[in-house]
Image (spheres, rainbow, N blue to C red):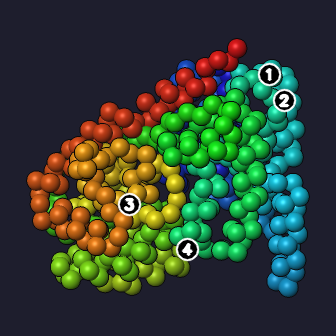
Amino acid sequence: MQILMLSSTFPYPPTRGGTEVRTFNLLRYLQNNHDVTLVTQRSPDTSEDDITALKAWVTELILIPSPPAPQQPKLLRPLYQIGRLVRSFAVGIPPNVLHRYSQSLQAWIDQHVQSGKFDVITCEHGVNAVYIRPEFQRSLKTVLNAHSMGYRWTLNHLQMNASAHVWRDRLYLPIIHRYEKRHAQQFSTIIVTTPEDQEELKTLCPHTPAQVIPNGVDLDLFPYREVDPGGQKLVFVGAMDSDHNIEGARFFVTEVMPQLRQRYPELTLDIVGARPNATAQALGQAPGVTVTGRVPSVVDYLHQAVVCVVPLRTGFGIKNKTLEAMAAGVPVVGSDRGLEGLNIDNMGTSLYALRANRPEDYVTAVSQLLDNPQLRQQISQKGRSLVESTFTWEQAGKRYEQALAQDRD
């Protein structure tokens, strides 16, 4: 197949975040048997080495510059924001999508779709759906790899009081809903990562086929740990400029850590993730907590920890951080959000991870694992086995390839 893949975020190195990891690993699989033309925007921190490395994984790389950040005098900034909101309401497109939209790229896509060069066009994440015209379906297959549903994500942040911009998100919510509902109808197929997102999509667009293809893990990058390190070291992993990670880490540090340290005075928590903002860095002032920033090897921190906590209370979709910890053999204690998309419960007894949502749940679950090496080993082995059997990028890539090829005629 000749595949045109659209990604507004530059997917290399594949460690920046969940969107980049999923995009890179799927295109890497597709490139084995097909020609992939990747159109992406260069981010400000993209290096020439990154570009050279990514070119090796695609047939052709089309780079367009990211739009510059708006520069307005401080006094005029409110007027600019109001104008941006009015424009978004008028066209039914969220402001972040409008800001990144490129008319020159739209013209390039229109021309190449009309030329008949491509068999399939894929949008990696819903922000790229703005480039798909309804008539495209007459000449090629159009696929949206949704990654996550923006309306559901934003609403959840508001409901959990986790939004960093409450009034902005409240105003944007109907625009996001309108955008996702309209653009969902323009695709031949939509791919989501969890059954929960599949159900949400059915309410938006019941007539567009939706398929669940979960995330995966590169087992070479996350090898199974050779020994249980013991001790009392916990780890949380995630990009620390993301609201859902910051809120989850803050909840654990303020609500759970004090109770755990009453039982285990030597207990520590490493918060491992790039780009920690001021709020995230402040968490490092709590007793026993270290905020590392970017590290050379995330898996080294996982292997050194006795337990990985995933205390997310917002954000939907399957979590790479959870799968990667399980692949590395680290027992996971996670919330409903942290374990979404994983069938880890069996007859009411968790075999692959321990579930916790309230502070007392985390205290109980973490204590069980700290005090019971046999339980840690059982969950470690079960978690790795689950990833190997169900959640590898090889399996996800194969299913994605099948989805792109299905019913193209």
Measured as percent of width and height from the top left, residue 90 is found at: 89, 58
Whole-number angstrom distance, CA of label 4 to CA of label 2: 40 Å
Q: Measured along the vertical axis of the image, is residue 130 above or below residue 34?
A: below
Is 235 displayed left or right of 162 in the figure? Answer: left
**Residue bearing the label numbered 3:** 335
Q: Amino acid at mark 4?
A: Asn
Measure how far apart labels 3 and 4 are at the Cα level.
17 Å
Report the residue marked by disc 4. 161
Residue under circle 1?
139
Tell me whether the residue at label 1 lies in contact with that at label 2, contact meaning CB atoms closer than 8 angstroms: yes
Instruction: Name the residue located 38 percent from the left edge and 60 percent from the top edge.
Output: 335
Q: Which residue is mark 2?
A: 135
Is label 3 in a helix, a strand or a loop?
Answer: loop
Mark 4: which secondary structure?
A: loop
Q: Describe the element under mark 2 as helix, strand or loop.
A: helix
- For discs 1 and 4, the disc positioned in front in the rendered view: 4
Label 3 Cα neighbours within 10 Å, binned few <14 / some 14-19 / many ≥20: many
Query: Can residue 49 be seen here?
Result: no
Q: Quadrant of the N terminus?
A: top right
* Cα–Cα gap, marks 1 and 3: 44 Å
Kind of residue indicated by mark 1? Ser
- Amino acid marked by disc 3: Ser
- For marks 1 and 4 on the same chain, the one whose residue lies earlier in the sequence: 1
